[in-house]
Structure formats: C-alpha cells, structure tokens
Image (spheres, rainbow, N blue to C red):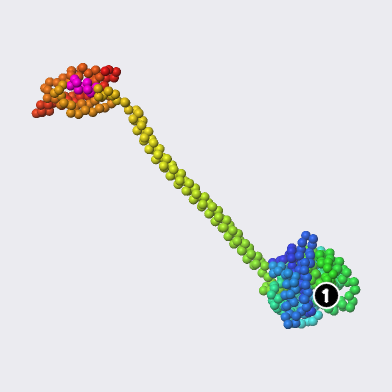
Amino acid sequence: MNMRFSKIKEFAVLLFSPDHVRCCLFRRDSKGVRLKAYASEAHDGTDPAKAWKQVLHKVGYSRVCPLMISGALKGGTFFRCGSVRLPPKAMRDALEFELPQRLLQQTTGNYELEFVELAGEGENVQVNVYTFPATDLENLAAMITQSGRKADYFIYPLLALRESDGPVFLPEAEPDFYFADGEWHSAEELPTDWFSFWDKTLRREFILPEDYGFNPAEWLGCLLTARLAVADDTRHTFGGLNILPKQLRPSRLRNQLRLTALLIVLLLINFGWGLAGQLSGHHREYSSLVATRNRLRTQVTTAQRKLKSAEKELRELSRVVSQSPGEYDVIGKLAGFSTVLPGNVLVTNFRLSDGGVDFTMRSEAESLNIPEILRPLKTWKVEQIQQRRRNNDAASVITLKLVSVEGEE
C-alpha cells in the first residue's frame, strides 16, 4: 500500500543522534506547511528511550499522526547513483548490485537499503540510497518499541536531497563529512556560507517559528526529512522506504476499519433508535385511532338501536294514526238494536270492529225473521246473517254482522 506524503495534513519527525533527540510536529494548512511544535532532549544513560518519550510528549504527538524516525545508523552508508526508471521491487534488486562498489568496508552479512528516486526527465534517473547492516535495524526496532510508539517510516535525512541542492552538513549523521554534488567531502572543506542556501530554501518551503530560540541549522535533519514528506516533485514510493518490520508500523487501516465498523454500529443503533421512536409513535397513534374507532362504533351501535326503536315507535304511531276512528255513537246504536230485538233472543257474544259489530245470538223461537226485525233500524244494515239449529236442540244459533250506515241516524 502506497502512502502519498504530500497528502498528509499533520505528521511528526523524530531525529535521533548519539547525544540528543529532536522532534518536530508539522501541520499543513491553507498557507503552507507549518512547524507547529518542536522539542529537544539529551539522552539519559539509564533509560535510552526516555528522551524519545519526552520529546513526543512535548510536541503533543498523537498516535493517529504519522511518525517518521530519522537519523544515522552505526554502519550505514549514503550514496547517490544513476539508474533507469524501474518499479520499486526491481529498483531494489538493481541497487543491491551497487552495494559491493559503494560500501567502504567489505563485510559479510545482510544489508538493508532504502532509496528515493529523484525527479528527472527521460529514462535515466538519479537515486539517493541509504544502506546499513540488518543488525542495526534490530537496535532501532528496540528503541521504537521501548518508546511505546510505532513508526510509519525510518528515513535517513539526506534521502531528501535533490540534484540542485547546495552542500549540506549534518553533524548528527556524519560529523566528519558533508555532502555536495553527489559526493562526500571532508568537513574541513565546508564553505562558511553553506547554510545560507538552506536558510532560504527551508523558509520558502516551510513556515518556521519567528522566535529567537529557534535556529534552523540545529533542526536541519528534521526539516530535511519533513521536506521529503511534503515534496510533490520527488518520486518516492512506499516500496522504496518500507524497511521497518510490520510489527513496528501502526495498523491504521485496521484502526480505520474498526472505527468504520464502530460508526456503522452507531449509525445502526441511531437508525434503530429512530425507527423504534417512529414505531412507538405509530403504535400510539394506531392505539388512539383504534380507541376512537371503537368509541365511534359504540356510538353508531347505540344510535342504530335508538333509530330502530324510534322507527318501531313511528310505525306504531303511523298505524294508530292511519286507523279509522270507528263508531262515535256505538252505545246509542246498540241501544237501538237492543230495542228492536225480540225478548226471546239472547245475545251471547258480540265484537266491535271497524265500521261494524259481530253478534252471536240464541233463540228458541221456531220462526224468526231477523232482517225483518231489524228493518226499523236506520243506522245499521245487515251485511251477513247465518241461522242454524243444532240437532236435538230447541234453540237456534244466529250469527249476525251489522255495519254502520254512514250519514244516517
């Protein structure tokens, strides 16, 4: 996985040397790359990692911030050589063939190397290379582990040099030599004004503190390493600088995945909480609607029952209203009927109906002409008459129906 240094917003550089440890915290903002904080501590003989912890604490370093370890290892060698453009793995293999010619001492054992391909046109390029015995990496790993931190890269500070740069002298890395024009030279030949070039260059590339306590020459190693981190025109890849063991590098991708998973869980919980609130609100609204429906249903049932009762009462009233008022003078007319009725006739039953009267009578007379008897009545007329005599019975039974004559007295 490649990391694009130029996209880093904040990073720290820790430069170690035999005497002291320096640390700088850089922050990229709209105005440029700013040196946000810096600190320096001398080594503690009893606890070599103590100074590392102190400077990281002083600059306010956070574990989420990329950390670059810089410095010179005991058996390390820096050189610049020509090559052709190659992928990182092929470039590393090609540079290994250069090692026998570049190492000052021909010793046996494994060597680690890191490199930076310089910007240029065409297929031929210049490459900055730093190589050191693999055993030196074990000592560096021990210091990183004892400091309680993990580092993204180990970068030799002179890897940031470009072909157009002036002489550079780093006592922390090489106290007896300075590097210029692609070669090492004796420190005794160092020009007195050599730092003027770097003072202008660094102030152009970084926003440095204006206080009098900050001397850029003392922090040149950190600034060169930071220069490599923020450069846009330097071709460098993770493969060229990736020499630290996996256990010493922070697992930011794993942490990001964990953070992403945590955020997803929190989003799901938030969504579930909101959904539960909505469901609860919907349930309350549904319960309210059901209660309203039941109340309205009860009211409708009660109204329907009352309506049926009112309809029944209305039908009864209508039936009463629609009935014929009947005979107003039924008593007088019955009295008239009783007057003309012979004494030998007995009324055994009578029933009033609309506009008429039904009679059941008995008589022992052998010859009885009921219509003739009733002729004097002007208010009644015979509608139906039946006269019969039962066997062995001297009396006859007469069934008579009279109807009222309207408008007659």
Q: Does the magenta stretch include residue 260?
A: no
* Magenta-colored segment: predominant secondary structure: helix
Residue at the spot x=78%, y=79% of the render?
18
Find numbered disc 1 in the image and state the secondary structure of the residue it sits on. loop
Question: Closer to the camera, 274 or 185?
Answer: 274
Question: Closer to the camera, 339 or 263?
Answer: 339
Residue at the spot x=21%, y=28% of the render?
350
Q: In which quarter of the image is residue 379?
A: top left
Q: Is residue 334 magenta?
A: yes
- 157 sits left or right of 340 in the view: right
Query: Looking at the figure, which quarter contains the N terminus?
Result: bottom right
How many numbered discs? 1
- 319 sits left or right of 24 in the view: left
Residue at the spot x=25%, y=27% of the render?
352
Q: In the rendered view, would you say 14 is above or below 29?
A: below
Q: What stretch is highlighted in magenta?
A: 333-341
**Which residue in the structure is indicated by mark 1?**
170
Whether residue 376 appears in this view of the structure is: yes
Residue at the spot x=47%, y=48% of the render?
291
Relative image position of residue 383 (x, y in whole percent): 23, 22
Relative image position of residue 239 (x, y in whole percent): 72, 69
Q: Quadrant of residue 267?
A: bottom right
Question: Closer to the camera, 30 or 183?
Answer: 30
Query: Looking at the figure, which quarter contains the C terminus?
Result: top left
